[in-house]
Image (tube, helix red, strand yellow):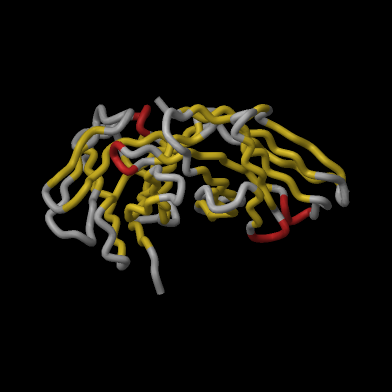
Amino acid sequence: AQSVTQLGSHVSVSEGALVLLRCNYSSSVPPYLFWYVQYPNQGLQLLLKYTSAATLVKGINGFEAEFKKSETSFHLTKPSAHMSDAAEYFCAVSVTQGGKLIFGQGTELSVKP
Amino acid sequence: EAQVTQNPRYLITVTGKKLTVTCSQNMNHEYMSWYRQDPGLGLRQIYYSMNVEVTDKGDVPEGYKVSRKEKRNFPLILESPSPNQTSLYFCASSSLRRTSGGGRGYEQYFGPGTRLTVT
């Protein structure tokens, strides 16, 4: 069965610092992985997706993620945090049955001035 | 514009009063789902539909009903809401995409969410 674990429910960084949000997955088939962002009082917005075409995936707003099969990881990074990046981030893996996504618990990112 | 719409966006109701949250998509997607989002739990699937008249339970179906009479619509029904159904609800639609590695995956498009409070 597929599953996703996000390490750290809260991450705090200073403006301009590196952002690293961790995600590990479990999947018995080639995974289809996503990162979504949710700004306060808003819905889910797709940041980026991995579809096995390339291991380094670039998304919107300067975010990227690298798929590492040996580590079963799909960590999200951004070189320099902006105040506007403060939000909750969800990692998800797609499963065949039910056409659904299995979500991690979410990581709330705070950015300090 | 491709989108998933939900109504209402906000709803406050009382225990036991039946309600329906509507969901509609304009992308001709076969698959539609309902999720609920609760703090610390991420999003969990309530029900899903693989096509018209085909629905099945997700991970947390208790207390909910759905129907899929038209491809574009997938309403969520709470026959007798209770306070533990206070949550943020998302509708999503998707189509099947086969990955180059041979796996199957679903790119999901989410609605804006419905914040439900049951008192």
Residue found at the far bottom of this picture: B1
**Percent of width and height locating residue A74:** 62, 38
The residue at the point 71 percent across, 48 percent down is: A86
The residue at the point 56 percent across, 48 percent down is: A36
Is residue B59 at least partly visible in the picture? yes
How many numbered marks does the figure carry? 0
**Percent of width and height locating residue B63:** 24, 30
Residue B109 in the image: above or below residue B67: below
Q: Give A78 or B21, whichever is nearer the viewer.
A: A78
Dividing the picture into quarters, in which one does residue B76 lie? top left
Residue B62 in the image: above or below residue A78: above
The residue at the point 62 percent across, 43 percent down is: A88
The quarter of the rendered structure image containing the N terminus of chain B is bottom left
Judge left or right: residue B88 versus residue A9. left
Residue B111 in the image: above or below residue B58: below
The quarter of the rendered structure image containing the C terminus of chain B is top left
Q: Give B39 or B96, whichever is nearer the viewer.
A: B96
**Percent of width and height locating residue B115:** 43, 46
Q: Give B101 or A87, whichever is nearer the viewer.
A: B101
Dividing the picture into quarters, in which one does residue B118 lie? top left
The residue at the point 39 percent across, 65 percent down is: B3
**Percent of width and height locating residue A67:** 62, 41
Is residue B119 at least partly visible in the picture? no
